[in-house]
């Protein structure tokens, strides 16, 4: 059995320790759709194109059970206006 509610930021931390290509611009796009009619987003990518990495990144960013500021402070999302507004503010399933 795994942890399904608020899985934390350990998965994203392990990704950052390896070779990581910054895809945090995706977070800014998700932030722009929150509380709008277009709030449902589907990530359909071919296999082996980083869906799991994107999911771990989003979990680490939105998960309210941990503090992920140090993981994102050097990445693209930290330069966006919505960075602190939504960081660690939601329950994640």
Image: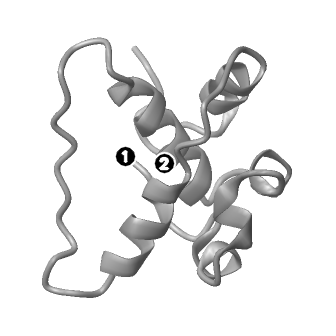
Q: How is the image coloured?
A: one colour
Separation of marks 2 and 1 at Cα, in angstroms: 11 Å
- Horizontally, is 64 left or right of 27 in the view? right
Name the residue located 54 percent from the left edge and 41 percent from the top edge. 57
Is 9 in front, or is 36? Answer: 36
Quadrant (top left/top right/bottom left/bottom right) for the N terminus: top left
Q: Residue 65, position in %: x, y? A: 66, 53
Dot label at residue 52: none
Name the residue located 72 percent from the left edge and 14 percent from the top edge. 18
Q: Residue 93, position in %: x, y? A: 37, 46
Query: Which residue in the protein does label 1 denote?
Result: 93
Name the residue located 30 percent from the left edge and 77 percent from the top edge. 33
In the rendered view, would you say 90 is above or below 5?
below
Marked residue nearer the N-terminal end (2 or 1): 2
Query: Which residue in the protein does label 2 denote?
Result: 58
In the rendered view, would you say 52 is above or below 77?
above
Residue 10, image quadrant: top right
Q: Residue 11, position in %: x, y? A: 61, 26
Q: Is residue 60 visible?
A: yes
- Horizontally, is 60 left or right of 2 in the view? right
Name the residue located 65 percent from the left edge and 73 percent from the top edge. 83
Is 64 in front, or is 13? Answer: 13
Find numbered disc 1 in the image and state the secondary structure of the residue it sits on: loop
Q: Residue 36, position in %: x, y? A: 23, 87
Crowd class of label 1 (few under 14; some 14 to 19; many from 20; radius 10 Å): few
Find numbered disc 2 in the image and state the secondary structure of the residue it sits on: helix
Crowd class of label 2 (few under 14; some 14 to 19; many from 20; radius 10 Å): some
Residue 22, image quadrant: top right
């Amino acid at each position: 059995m795994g942890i399904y509610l608020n899985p934390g930021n350990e998965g994203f931390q392990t990704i950052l320790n390896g070779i990581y290509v910054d895809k945090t611009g995706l977070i800014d796009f998700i932030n722009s759709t929150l509380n709008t009619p277009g709030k449902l987003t589907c990530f359909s990518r071919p296999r082996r194109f980083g869906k799991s990495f994107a999911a771990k990144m989003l979990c680490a960013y939105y998960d309210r059970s941990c503090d992920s500021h140090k993981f994102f402070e050097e990445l693209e999302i930290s330069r966006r206006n919505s960075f602190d507004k939504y960081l660690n503010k939601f329950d994640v399933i």
